[in-house]
Amino acid sequence: MRARAVVFVARDEVAFQEIEVPQPQPTDVVVRVHYSWISPGTEGSFLRCERIGGETPFRPGDPLPFPLVAGYQKTGIIEWVGSEVEGLAVGEWVFASVSHVQGMFHSMGGHVSPAVTPADQVWKLPAGLSPVEASGLILTQVGYNCGTCAPVAQGEVAVVLGDGLVGQWSAQTLAWRGATVAMVGRHDFRLGRFRAAHSMTLNARQVDPVPRVQALAPAGVAVVVDTVGSIPAVEAFLPLMKHDGHIVSAGFYGEMGHMDIQKLRPRETSLHSPSGWTRSRVDATLALLAEGHLDAATLITHRFAVSEAREAWDTLVHGHDEALGVILEWE
């Protein structure tokens, strides 16, 4: 069976091409994709050959992870439903995560259509939710996961390191839970996308964020969420944390993720390491999107025809400051 896909054919080389996908099985659903959302962090680290698996960094001697069908998130309309699948029907708008592919470094990928997808990786879209906004649902769920895995009380201060997509949705989730959020980033354009009552944004290129956060949190910081993969950035805020505070680590560190646990003991700080997605967390994220508690629309900055996937990646790499949510349009 033939399909179209966005393929990383070599380091820093993106192509839109035909590939082989397996014939659908009774437990599969086939989706005609309309929109897919690029994940700059995860996909970018594969494209740069920084990792060969979800949490596995590339090391000298490892096989190069190419060719690879990039991504893990998209929306479209069901074209076919396997005989063992329940609750899904032809013609419905759905979200799909990873789908079967052949002849690639990994046997699953995201940016591919038609998408032969296990039914447990397909979610029906609620009525009224834009399929464009829902096309980044897995990445939205990563932010939701970061924002919910640590306890935080109403009004307590949470620091989010990073103004990218995961940082945005982490901050939105924490604000929805009632936290006062300090987002620390490096891009005024992106920082301007986060707006929440009693919260602040800080450009670390322009100001030292530590004293600003200290003034915001005289009782101590309850949560620090690292979405950029920087141990030094996390450690800069350790002296500001309250007793029984929480660090949430979601960045990709490669082989630079070493932290001295002894530094966490004085305040009995907990460390959370969320990864991947689960059915229940995606369900909860989808509900918050549909109810308007999480926002995706204002994070979308660029839309490209899927045939322009190379240009889309050029925009992410070279137009970095004002490129955030990048959508590929398939139909």
Image (cartoon, rainbow, N blue to C red):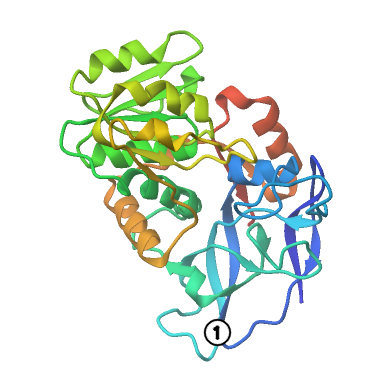
Q: Is residue 240 visible?
A: yes
Q: Which quarter of the figure has residue 303?
A: top right
Q: Is residue 297 above or below residue 137?
A: above
- State which quadrant residue 27 falls in: bottom right
User: Mark 1 sits on what residue?
Assistant: 27
x and y percentages locating residue 187 in the rendered image: 51, 20
Viewer-proximal residue among 33 and 74:
74
Q: Along the horizontal axis of the image, is 183 left or right of 314?
A: left
From what the image shows, is residue 198 above or below residue 136?
above
The amino acid marked with disc number 1 is Thr
Instruction: Residue 254 in the image: state x and y as whole percent.
Output: 64, 41
Picture coordinates of residue 183, whole percent (x, y): 38, 26
Left or right of residue 182, residue 110 in this image: right
Q: Residue at x 73, y 44 (%)?
A: 47
Query: Viewed as shown, does residue 159 lie left or right of 6?
Result: left
Q: In this orientation, which residue lies closer to the viewer: 286 or 231?
A: 231
Residue at left offset 81%, top offset 68%: 103
Using the image as rendered, state which of residue 82 and residue 252 is in the foreground. 252
